Structure formats: structure tokens, C-alpha cells
Image: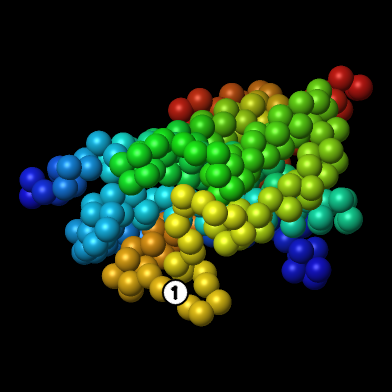
Amino acid sequence: MSHFFTMGGYAFYVWSSWAIGMAILIAITWHSISHARITRNELDALEHPKQQRDPDA
Amino acid sequence: MIMFDYLANPTRFRKITTAILPVAVLVSAVALAFGLYLAFLASPADYQQGETVRIMYIHVPAAWMAMMCYLLMALSAVFYLVWRHPLADIGARAMALPGAGFALITLLTGSFWGRPMWGTWWVWDARLTSMLILFFLYLGYMALADGFERAERGSKPASLLLLVGVINLPIIKFSVDWWNTLHQGSSVLRLDGPSIDPAMLKPLLIMALAMLGWFIAITILRMNTLIMRRRITNLESRKSWS
């Protein structure tokens, strides 16, 4: 098991690569979801000006 | 063309993509779990590169995706420039950020692989430089597409940039054959078949599938956001006239 974490002495390079890669994918996912949510709320407010949508819905 | 016309109706597009999205997310999640297992537990260390070979399972699929995404954007640009359909333009715009992300992942993980194996974070050789140019093409496209007050103004110059940049794709692919480079040659997409061991090919392909599923889901999500954004712009301009 310790071999898994040390990666034969290359732990820094292997784990940094995967951490950076995953961080970029997660950041883009988060950005896309939050943008979709903001835009949907904005559009709903324009199309139905009377009934305000719950921002968390 | 019939297929494209069929999909080009925004309401129908929304309906179809809403059905595809959860499937893409599911495929991506399952493939990621399986891919991580294969990449870290079920595949051997390389006889020359030791455990650093595990960087390959994120580096290489990301590079494939970065190139495939650019090709799809260039095809969308053709559809947009020739048939003027806004959905093709929206598609290219939606793919730009994930594409840039894949190119950046390729460059950074490559650096973290090059340092222990080549003794350097970076060299200005053909493969690395052409991949850096791909990343800059993505950034340039985004700057050009979004650089105008009215979003549609940027569509034509940005699409033209995509077409010009296509020349970079074969340069990336064949750079390792055309020039002397530190970067190793192709071991998967070769005329004489893959030379890579199946135990290493499998995690590569599964990780590529995970990234493809993610890419499809993100593109659908971003396209629908852009469609809503255009609707907002239309509604607002109508309001300011009435």
C-alpha cells in the first residue's frame, strides 16, 4: 500500500499531474453549472416577471 | 444535412440533449471509476519509466480530446460559415472552454512527466510547441468570439480563426515523425497497429471514454446556456423597443 502512495519515488510528479488534471475538469464543470443556473434564473425573470423563482430551485 | 436540419430546431435540440445528458454523465462516471482502477491498480509500471507511466493515463487521453474537440469546432465553423446556422456557432463556442482545459491538462501533465524522465519541465521542440499553439488557438478563439458587444459579431472572425488553425492538427500528430524530438513517438494510432501493451492500452481507452462523456455533458450544458443567453438578448432588445 505504501508503494501506491510513494509511486516508486515519483509520488510528487504522478499525484501532482492527476490533481491538476482533475482540478481543471472540476473547475470547468463548476463554472458551466453555475453559469447555466444564473442564466436560467435571468431568463425566468424575463419570461415570467410576476412570479419570481426561488433562486435555489 | 437532414440530420443537422432535424437537430437545428432549438426546442427539439433541447429535448434530445436533455435525454443524452444524464447518459453521458453516467458513462463518464463509470468509466472514470474503472479507468482509475486500471490506471493505478491493475496496470504495471513501465520497464523504463517506472511509475511515472501512470501520468500517461491522463496526459494522452487529454491530448486526444484537445485535438478532437478542435476538429469538431472547426467542423462547426464550416457549418456556420456555409449554412449560417446559429446552432453551429453556439456549438463551437460551447466546446472552446473544455477544449482549452484539455490542452492545458496535456501541457501541465506533460511537464510533470518530462521533469523526472527528460530532466526538464519544458523544451521548445515540435510536439510541445505545437500543443502550446493549440492552447493559444483556443484562447484566441474565445477572445475573438466574446470580444464584441453583440456576441454574433465575433462569430465570423472566430470561425475563420478556427479554420486557419486546423493546419496545426496534423503538425501536432506528425511532429514526432517529422522532427527530432524528446517526445516519444506514437504507440496507439499507428499504421501498423498499436505497439503499446494491452494492459496499458486499456486504461488509456477507458480514461478517454470518461473524458468523452464529460465533454459531451459539458458541451450540452454550455450550449443550452448559450441558447438561453441569446433568448435573453432577444427579449431585452424587444423590451427596449416597445
**Is residue B221 at least partly visible in the picture?**
no
Q: List the single residue furthest toward the right.
A: B241
Residue ID at (35%, 39%) = B119
Residue B57 screen position, x and y as percent: 36, 55
Displayed quadrant of residue B26: bottom left
Q: Which residue is mark 1?
A: B194
The quadrant in which the N terminus of chain B is found is bottom right
Q: List the single residue furthest toward the bottom.
A: B192
* Residue nearer the viewer, B108 or B13: B108
Does B108 appear above or below B51?
Answer: above
Badge 1 crowding class, 10 Å Cα cut-off, few under 14, some 14 to 19, many 20 or more, is few
Residue type at the position of mark 1: Pro
Does B235 appear above or below B131?
Answer: above
Q: List the single residue furthest toward the left.
A: A1
Residue ID at (76%, 64%) = B4
**Is residue B118 at least partly visible in the picture?**
yes
Q: Mark 1 falls within which chain? A: B
Q: List the single residue furthest toward the top.
A: B240
Q: How is the image coloured?
A: rainbow
Residue B149 screen position, x and y as percent: 81, 23
Residue ID at (38%, 62%) = B204
Residue ID at (39%, 51%) = B58
Q: Image check: B87 left or right of B60?
A: right
Determine the secondary structure under disc 1: loop
Residue B115 screen position, x and y as percent: 35, 39
The quadrant in which the C terminus of chain B is found is top right
Q: Image check: B90 left or right of B224?
A: right
* Residue nearer the viewer, B119 or A46: B119
Residue A12 screen position, x and y as percent: 25, 36
* Residue nearer the viewer, B206 or A12: A12
